[in-house]
Image: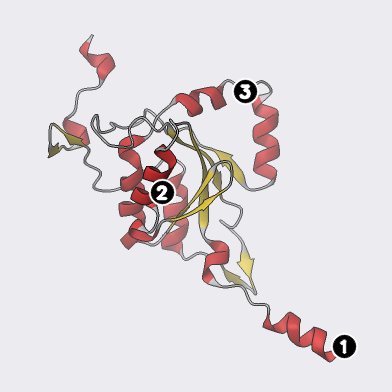
Amino acid sequence: MKNRQNKKRDCRLDSTAFQTSIVCGLLHKVGHEKRFEKMIDGKHGIKLRKLAFYDVEIPLDDKRYNKAVNLLKPFLCGILDKGFSILPFKKFIEKKLNKHGLRILRVSGKFKTQPRHPLNYCGFAPLLLDEKYLNFKFMGQDVYTPEQKANLIRLRTFETKGYKPIINGKPTDENLLIKDEDLI
């Protein structure tokens, strides 16, 4: 009996147990998943876990959050995002997902992507955000610091500081770009 109690005490949660993840789909040509994994895994604290979809773990500290999300922004594609948005019974599905701490993300097309990015045609689209630990307390303490909570809320819209897509070989401020629909 004492052995069992000692095992329970030794089972401690580490900091990675509460890392925020984004479930993302990748619609791609055969072989593009290896390029995606090589270019993203381990950069700016991002960790990949692979099932049928990708689970992208985003660090929430200010130092790495902006770099990590800005690394993903240049090649977002809206095909899976658009397909996800026309699901029948969407309100019912969203309500069920919210019960489990998941939020449907709709971020594709909200900012300029890089036209010549090597992962541009891999079909990367963030679909779900796991935010079940946003207000969670572990042993009486908040799991996230106020800084991490703020970045988790910003992750809902992929809001970052310092994002400059590379257009014609130069980092360009997004505010200076003219939107396609304004050119008509």
Q: Is residue 65 above or below residue 16?
A: above
Between marks 1 and 3 in the image, the one whose residue lies nearer the viewer: 1
Say which residue appears at 22% left-offset and 35% top-offset: 174
Say which residue appears at 56% left-offset and 73% top-offset: 14
Quadrant in which the N terminus appears = bottom right
* Residue 107 quadrant: top left
Q: Residues within 10 Å of mark 1 (few under 14, many from 20)?
A: few
Which residue carries the number 1 mark? 1
Mark 2 residue type: Glu
Tell me if label 2 and label 1 are in contact, CB under 8 Å: no
Which residue carries the number 2 mark? 37
Which residue carries the number 3 mark? 87
In the structure shown, which secondary structural element does the residue marked by tag 1 occupy? loop
Give the side of residue 104 with respect to residue 75, left or right: right
Mark 1 residue type: Met
In the structure shown, which secondary structural element does the residue marked by tag 2 occupy? helix
- The residue lying furthest to the front in this view is 31
Give the side of residue 157 with respect to residue 169, left or right: right
Say which residue appears at 56% left-offset and 63% top-offset: 18
Among numbered discs 2 and 3, the one appearing first in the sequence: 2
Say which residue appears at 61% left-offset and 73% top-offset: 13
Among numbered discs 2 and 1, the one appearing first in the sequence: 1
Q: CA distance from mark 2 to mark 1?
A: 45 Å
- The residue lying furthest to the bottom in this view is 2
* Percent coordinates x, y for residue 27 in the rendering: 47, 31
Q: Is residue 159 above or below residue 111?
A: below
